[in-house]
Image (cartoon, grey):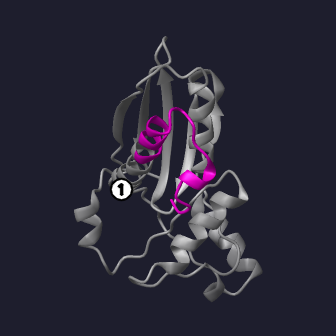
């Protein structure tokens, strides 16, 4: 496959072309999220190819095609030349904000972990306190750092713009509630939906 530097505008001009999307996933939850996006997409036609689909590289495609046609009817075999267009608007946004508490909190790290995991955060790197969250708006990575005196916490949220803004709103609210409640927070204090 030859990577191309096509952008969204270039793809939009070619509405009559077909595209093969290959979406890799690490677990069943990720697979389900991708399947939901594809099933709910209502612009154009999305179908799953029938039969066996393989990406072939580094071989004589004419010889392979001949071998396949020798074994099944020719109208059952299709061969396409693929040119990777890749993610066309892969823009990563990063938002950071700091909350200063009225008094130092002994358990600030634990409270931050509690809030982030209640937002469905999954710890991906314990050394840097990095979490991954998949919300209704998309996937983000969240990192936090506390001050030496435990009176300040800085959260950094990275991902595409919409989910970053969505999760920033939630975390600003959650940590302001923590501050207002003198370092105490329960699941009742956190809205259910993200």
Residue annotated with mark 1: 162
Instruction: Identify whether 62 is placed above or below 184.
Output: below
* Residue visible at 55% across and 82% down in the picture: 47
How packed mark 1 is, by other alpha carbons closer than 10 Å (few <14, some 14-19, many 20 or more), is some
Q: Hey, which residue is sitting farthest top in the picture?
A: 148
Q: Hey, which residue is sitting farthest right in the picture?
A: 71
Q: Is residue 180 visible?
A: yes
Judge left or right: residue 169 versus residue 49: left
* Residue visible at 28% across and 74% down in the picture: 14
159 vs 105, nearest the viewer: 105
Instruction: Identify whether 108 is placed above or below 192.
Output: above
**Residue 166 on the magenta span:** no
Image x and y of residue 171, in percent:
45, 44
61 vs 24, nearest the viewer: 24
Image x and y of residue 7, in percent:
27, 57
Q: Which residues are magenta?
A: 173-194
């Amino acid at each position: 496959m030859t990577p191309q530097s096509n952008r969204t505008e270039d793809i939009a001009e070619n509405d009559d072309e077909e595209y093969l999307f290959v979406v890799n996933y690490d677990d069943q939850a990720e697979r389900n999220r991708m399947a939901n996006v594809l099933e709910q997409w209502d612009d154009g036609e999305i179908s799953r190819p029938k039969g066996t689909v393989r990406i072939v590289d580094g071989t004589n495609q004419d010889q392979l095609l001949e071998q396949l046609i020798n074994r099944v009817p020719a109208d059952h075999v299709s061969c396409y030349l693929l040119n990777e267009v890749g993610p066309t608007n892969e823009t990563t946004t990063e938002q950071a904000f700091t909350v200063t508490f009225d008094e130092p909190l002994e358990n600030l790290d634990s409270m931050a972990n509690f809030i982030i995991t209640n937002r469905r955060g999954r710890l991906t790197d314990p050394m840097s306190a990095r979490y991954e969250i998949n919300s209704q708006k998309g996937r983000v990575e969240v990192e936090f750092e506390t001050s030496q005196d435990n009176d300040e916490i800085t959260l950094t949220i990275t991902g595409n713009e919409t989910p970053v803004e969505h999760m920033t709103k939630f975390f600003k609210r959650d940590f302001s509630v923590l501050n207002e409640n003198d370092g105490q927070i329960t699941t009742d204090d956190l809205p259910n939906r993200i």
